[in-house]
Image (cartoon, helix red, strand yellow):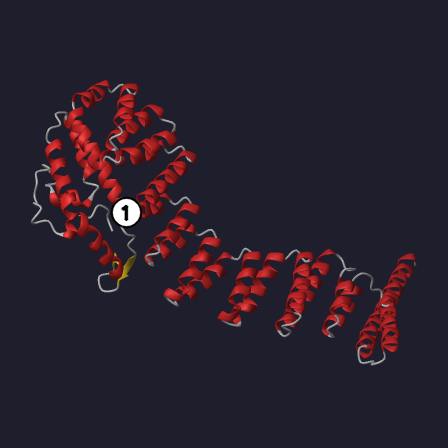
Amino acid sequence: MNIKFTSIWCCCLILLASVQLSAQNKDIEKGKEKLKGAFKQKDQAKKNEEIQKATELLQKGGLKREMYVILGDAFLENGELTQAETKYGQCDKVEKAEGYGKVAAAYVEQAMGDAKQENKLLDKAMKDYGKAGKAKEGAASIGDKFYERGEKFYPKAIDYYFRGTDTPSVIKIARDYEKKGADGMTPAFDLYKRAGLFKKAGDLAWESKQYAKAYDAYSAGEVTDGMRKCADKFYSLGQESEAQNIYIKMVESYTKTANTDGIEKLATENVNVMNYGLAARIYDKAGNLNQAKKYYAYDKFMALDLDSAKLLFTESDQVNLAKAIDANMKVLLPLKDVKMQFDDWAKQQPNVGIEMDPETNQYKPVAKDEQMLVDYYKLIKDQISDQCQIISKNINLIKDPELKKVLMKRFLQYPAVGKILDKQTFAVKLTRGSTQVKDVYLKRL
């Protein structure tokens, strides 16, 4: 009897719950319909009244915070984004984030069709993407919108791609610029560099023969292989100061990573080609003061600063070379005078512009400037030839082979010496009469 009664009672409860749930569902549906009708009202007061009634029906239907999703969606569908944002803000965490994301997307769509309000609307969109926890994704999606509108809008797309740290999309635009050839090189370079793709930026500039830009990128990324080839290129163009500064920058990079082998290799390479001043700077920068002093001594001698060279040779345990300077002083002093004269003439040499020869793809002097150069050297051609005779005589009187080798290297830095004298023996090869104007240039073009 008790079991029967209990079963009947349970059935009644289930039936009652079912009836109650059905009634609630009807209230929710009525609320949704009422909400739709509210947005058809033209009178604002009537509209608000209908929305309130719809809200009451939804509440009667048992909805609590989930009711705000329905309200937010209704406002969103009718373009009332501020109100939609407010309603979504009253939802639970997950629904709130989804709601903010939907409002943000709606602001973006509005912005794409309203140039005057574009910035304002996109700012609102980004704020909502931020509230939704999707700031980067949102920024990237805005970038896509601008990208789809064509090259005119690339700058805006780029800004949003960077805000979204969307490097692949930045590269996509950079490649679009690259396809334009020379006209697109600079914007592509700037994008690669801004994205931290320093080697890619440097390689692009290098291929375009814009070596200063290439070094700028390689240096920013401490791409030592790229820096090295830029240094070699600057040397070949006669820009020795720029090249040496690159080497020092490379030493700084190597020092950060404790790459002592890299530093030693750089220094040794420069010693081997008798580029003593730079070798000394490299050792100095690396903290190897003994080696630095040694090669500063060689550098001073190469510059025929004889007193400084003797002092440094003595301090770096190379007393034999200091004594050799004293022993050869009679021939070194005339050579010092020649060097001073050559340096003076070289300083007065007219400036010559350099341009790319489209046929050979090589640099050459600008034609009008080269004529100025010819006119200048016509006046001193014979004097330079006579000075080379003095160099030949005195170099071959030097008894110490080390000092002789260093000075031959130094004087061969003047192109005229290598033309008028034999590069190996320093014997006279061209007489006054056989020397042409272009044989006596004192600076590389």
Q: Is residue 164 visible?
A: no
Residue that appears at 23% across and 21% down: 322
**Taking 169 as reference, is 427 left or right?**
left
Residue 15: percent from left, percent from top: 86, 67
Residue at which label 1 appears: 348
Q: Is residue 312 visible?
A: yes
State which quadrant residue 231 falls in.
Answer: top left
Residue that appears at 22% across and 39% down: 341
Observer-nearest of 13 and 193: 193
- Amino acid carrying mark 1 in the image: Gln
Observer-nearest of 394 and 70: 394
* Within-10-Å neighbours for mark 1: few <14, some 14–19, many 20+: few
Residue 319: percent from left, percent from top: 23, 18
Observer-nearest of 88 and 290: 290
**Taking 312 as reference, is 126 left or right?**
right
Question: For the image shown, how many numbered marks are present on the structure?
Answer: 1
**Taking 413 as reference, is 125 left or right?**
right
Reply above or below: 99 against 388: below
**Taking 361 as reference, is 420 left or right?**
left
- Element type at marker 1? helix
